[in-house]
Structure formats: C-alpha cells, structure tokens
Image (cartoon, grey):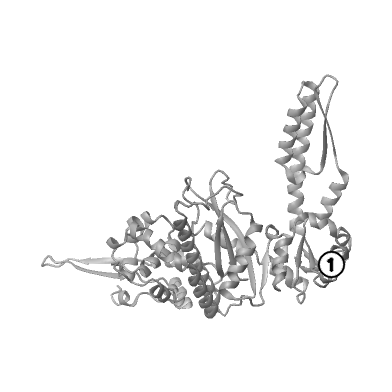
C-alpha cells in the first residue's frame, strides 16, 4: 500500500473512478486487484474466495472479505480500462519525479500471450507467431515501450496475427500523442525494421537505433575482414561503417546517410557456430541415410524431394551449406546427389558472432550506440517478469475489453515491481524485488484471542515482530508497518 501511495496511485484512482452507488469504492477494488496480481497472481474467483480472506488486506483496506466477490472484481476491470491512457501518463510522470529518470531512450519490443479456449468473441484473438511455443492457441500481441532502465511508459494490444513491423507506426504515434515529440531515440530490434518504417521515423526528424537482417551483413564483408575493430569490453568489438554511396539515389538521400555499427561478439560467435554445427551434422546424417535408401529402394523422386524439403526446413541454420539434387534414373526411381557449398561455409565462419546496427544518430560514439541497443534486454526482461512473476499467460478471459483490462492490471503490477526495484537500487539493496517481497511476506498479521473467567473472549490483532534482517529492509526502503496494528504488537 505504501508503494501505491508513493506513486499517488490511490489519489489518481479516487479522482478518476468517481464513487457511485457501489458499497466499496472502485478505487479500493482496483488496488486490491493490482496487489493480488503482484503478490499472488491468480483468477478473480481465487482472489475473492481464497486469497483475499486469508491476507491482511481486509484489515489494511477496511474492506471486509464478504464485500469482495468475483463479480465485483470483474466489474472493476471494466471500470478502470477507459482510463488507461491518462493512467500511463500519470505513472510515467510520477516515476520520473520519484527517481529523477530520463526518458531520452525509448526501447520498444513486442511479445505475445495466448488464450485458453477459442475466444471467439474477441477479434484480436488470432493465431500467429507464438513466443510461447503455443501455435495451437489463439493469442494477442503486446507492444511495450520502456525507458533505458526498464521503467514502462505504455503499451498497446494488437491482434495475434500482427507482424512486428506493422506495429511501429501506431506505437510511435501513441507515445508522441501522450508525451510529446521531444528529442528521443527509438531503439528496436530487426523484427521492426522495414524501409517504410525507417522513412516514417525520419520524416519528422525522429532518431533511431535498430537492428538489421542478417542478410545485410554481406554488404559489409570487406569491413569485417579489416583489422580496425575497437574493443569496448572483453569479447565485444565494434566499428562504425558507411554504406556504399551507390545505396543513395540523389543528393537529398546522401545528406541523410545513416551510420552502420558493425558488432562482433566472441561468445555469440561460439554460440552461432555450435548451432550451425548441430544443424549441419543432422542434415549430413539425414542425406547420407537418404542416399543409401534411394540406392537400395525404388523411391518416388517427388516424395524424396518433399522429404528433403521438410528436413532442410527443420534445420534452417545450416540448410544453405548444402546443394542437393534429386534426379530420376532410367527406371524412374530417385537418385540423390549432394555436396557442401564451400563459399557459404567460408562466409558463415567469417560472419559468426557478427551483427549490424543502423542509426541516424550522428553525435554518439560507437560504444554509446552499441550500449543503447543492448538496453533492449530491459524490454525482454519486462516480458519475462510479466510471464513468470505476474502470470500474464494464459488468458482465460474471452471478451475483448476484459482481455485488455487483464493486461492493464498486469501492467500496473509491473509498475509496482519496477518501483520497488528502483527503491531497492536507491537504498543500495540491488535490484531484486522478488527477494524483498518474499522476505517481508514472512511478517504476519495474527488474531489473538484471550478467554476470560466471565466467558467473554477478548480479541485483538497484532503483527509479528520483524527479524533483524526484515527491520533493516524496512528501514532502508523507508517502509513502516501499519501504525494502528503496531500499537497492539506483542
């Protein structure tokens, strides 16, 4: 509750969720849902029947357990959703004030989360590329924007069959509508890159650092061969490059030339080589076996070609290393001949561990540009927390508005998570909110019953005394136990 108060989230909710005829204010119900999502993510039914009655929240919020039922929680989802945009702006501004944050770098990434059930009433529920390896389920895609330290600025929900590249224009325009068009740098991975998107970003002077498709590396083969790499840390080398001038068609284009950052990682090279080697070994073993079977059996050439196609499709990382020909014998049977392609092998050995970034930022060094791009791991970490600690998946709601509201409450719980993380950093406690939550969860609110000779029981509540370590955490984070209960502490 005190983290919520620092964010002034309670004040915001009281303001935007005006009281009506409900017996429990929607603002209080919203806070119950957010806290539940942070501490013990589960269904609204479980929260109302199992979790809330057995927690200390009835005493802390003043809302009796009997007043919190699943219907009230479902209706609360509907009440808060229309305020999503202004809520994101409030939280961004408040977090900036609390921790003196800068929003000069905006990291954008997309993930997906899947449904249990058909979700036939939700037009956004579609089948698409699943980051959860659940291609059998319908899903929605979520585009999230975070700062360089992982503080979320906002998100949008897209249909489950949306390609990453199609989401860029909408998310950029939405963020600019909320926060203005200040001199920010957008950072995105190669899945967001298209010439249309880059032209859109450049059209109004936006700056960007983006990844590029692996195929683009071929244009910089000569640069890879040169020795003028700059080591910026152990195992990481970078260099600034310019594309061939013929890439630009006129004087206007030449004035807008981008800078490319060629990067090489020793660890990534070893990983890439190991992946390709495993795929290569699988393909080679399969081709040897298939060749022998074709020599001994009367195989249909078309069926053999399909079998080879499936096998290469399952080992795409090494497929280009092989040239395979299926011919028909005089008797009409399949005969397989294959060989390894030496130029492709040589290129793979040269390009292992290399990747290419492109940017229109001109006043940063190669090290600053590389570090900014690597910050995308903050967006990936945000998705990981959403999917593990906050259990955003699977989605059991089927109505579009309920699904959007479910994602909104997961987003709010993540804001609390990052707020606690920033408090830990400021207190010199590292950045592990889950360990802090686990430690402080051992402090219990207990009921004390004292029988008397008259037969009347004296009932009271108290908080267990914090251990020395727990008290250090409370002091460092400037948190206090509830004063009204501490007065009765044993």
Given residues 109 and 140, the one toward you in this image is 140
Q: Position of residue 355 (x, y in %)?
A: 77, 59
Q: On screen, 405 above or below 324?
A: below
Q: Position of residue 455 (x, y in %)?
A: 12, 65
Q: Is residue 259 visible to us here?
A: yes
Q: On screen, 394 above or below 187?
A: above
Quadrant (top left/top right/bottom left/bottom right) for the N terminus: bottom left
Side of 291 relative to 383 (left or right): right
Residue lying farthest top? 331
Given residues 65 and 216, the one toward you in this image is 216
* Quadrant position of residue 214: bottom right
Badge count? 1
At x 47%, y 45%, the residue is: 117
Side of 414 relative to 268 (left or right): left
Q: Is residue 371 visible to us here?
A: no
Given residues 333 and 193, the one toward you in this image is 193
Residue lying farthest left? 454
Q: Dot 1: few (<14), some (14–19), or many (≥20) neighbours within 10 Å? A: some
Q: Position of residue 114 (x, y in %)?
A: 52, 50
At x 53%, y 47%, the residue is: 138
Quick one: SS at disc 1? loop
Quadrant (top left/top right/bottom left/bottom right) for the C terminus: bottom left
* Quadrant position of residue 199: bottom right
* Quadrant position of residue 96: bottom right
**Where is mark 1, residue-wise?**
242
Side of 195 relative to 483 (left or right): right
Given residues 370 and 114, the one toward you in this image is 114
Q: Position of residue 112 (x, y in %)?
A: 57, 54
Side of 142 relative to 319 (left or right): left
Q: On screen, 306 above or below 174?
A: above
């Amino acid at each position: 509750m005190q983290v919520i108060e620092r964010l002034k989230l309670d004040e915001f909710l009281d303001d935007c969720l005006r009281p009506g005829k409900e017996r429990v204010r929607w603002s209080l119900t919203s806070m119950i849902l957010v806290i539940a999502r942070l501490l013990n993510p589960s269904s609204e039914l479980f929260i109302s029947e199992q979790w809330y009655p057995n927690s200390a929240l009835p005493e802390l919020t003043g809302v009796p357990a009997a007043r919190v039922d699943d219907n009230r929680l479902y209706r609360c989802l509907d009440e808060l959703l229309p305020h999503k945009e202004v809520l994101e702006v409030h939280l961004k501004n408040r977090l900036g004030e609390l921790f003196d944050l800068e929003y000069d770098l905006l990291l954008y990434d997309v993930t997906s989360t899947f449904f249990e059930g058909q979700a036939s009433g939700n037009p956004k529920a579609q089948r698409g590329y699943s980051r959860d390896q659940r291609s059998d389920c319908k899903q929605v895609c979520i585009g999230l924007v975070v700062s360089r330290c992982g503080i979320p600025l906002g998100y949008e929900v897209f249909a489950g069959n949306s390609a990453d590249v199609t989401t860029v224009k909408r998310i950029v325009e939405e963020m600019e509508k909320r926060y203005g068009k200040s001199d920010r740098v957008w950072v995105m991975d190669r899945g967001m890159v298209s010439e249309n998107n880059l032209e859109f970003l450049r059209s109004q002077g936006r700056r960007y650092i983006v990844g590029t498709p692996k195929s683009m590396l071929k244009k910089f083969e000569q640069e890879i061969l040169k020795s003028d790499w700059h080591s910026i840390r152990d195992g990481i080398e970078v260099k600034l490059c310019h594309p061939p001038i013929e890439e630009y068609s006129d004087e206007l284009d030449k004035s807008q030339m981008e800078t490319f950052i060629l990067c090489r990682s020793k660890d990534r090279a070893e990983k890439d080589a190991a992946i390709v080697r495993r795929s290569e070994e699988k393909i080679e073993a399969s081709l040897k076996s298939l060749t022998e079977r074709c020599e001994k059996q009367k195989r249909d050439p078309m069926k053999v070609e399909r079998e080879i196609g499936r096998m290469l499709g399952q080992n795409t990382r090494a497929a280009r290393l092989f040239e395979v020909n299926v011919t028909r014998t005089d008797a009409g049977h399949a005969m397989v001949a294959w060989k390894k392609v030496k130029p492709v092998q040589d290129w793979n050995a040269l390009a292992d561990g290399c990747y290419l970034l492109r940017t229109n930022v001109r006043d940063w060094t190669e090290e600053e540009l590389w570090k900014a791009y690597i910050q995308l791991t903050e967006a990936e970490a945000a998705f990981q927390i959403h999917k593990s600690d906050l259990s955003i998946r699977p989605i059991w709601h089927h109505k579009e508005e309920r699904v959007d509201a479910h994602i909104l409450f997961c987003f709010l719980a993540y804001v609390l998570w990052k707020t606690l993380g920033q408090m830990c950093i400021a207190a010199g406690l590292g950045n592990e909110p889950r360990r802090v939550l686990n430690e402080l969860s051992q402090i219990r609110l207990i009921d004390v019953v004292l029988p008397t000779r008259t037969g009347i029981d004296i009932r009271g509540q108290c908080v267990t005394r914090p251990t020395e370590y727990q008290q250090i955490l409370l002091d460092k984070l400037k948190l206090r136990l509830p004063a009204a209960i501490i007065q009765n502490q044993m």
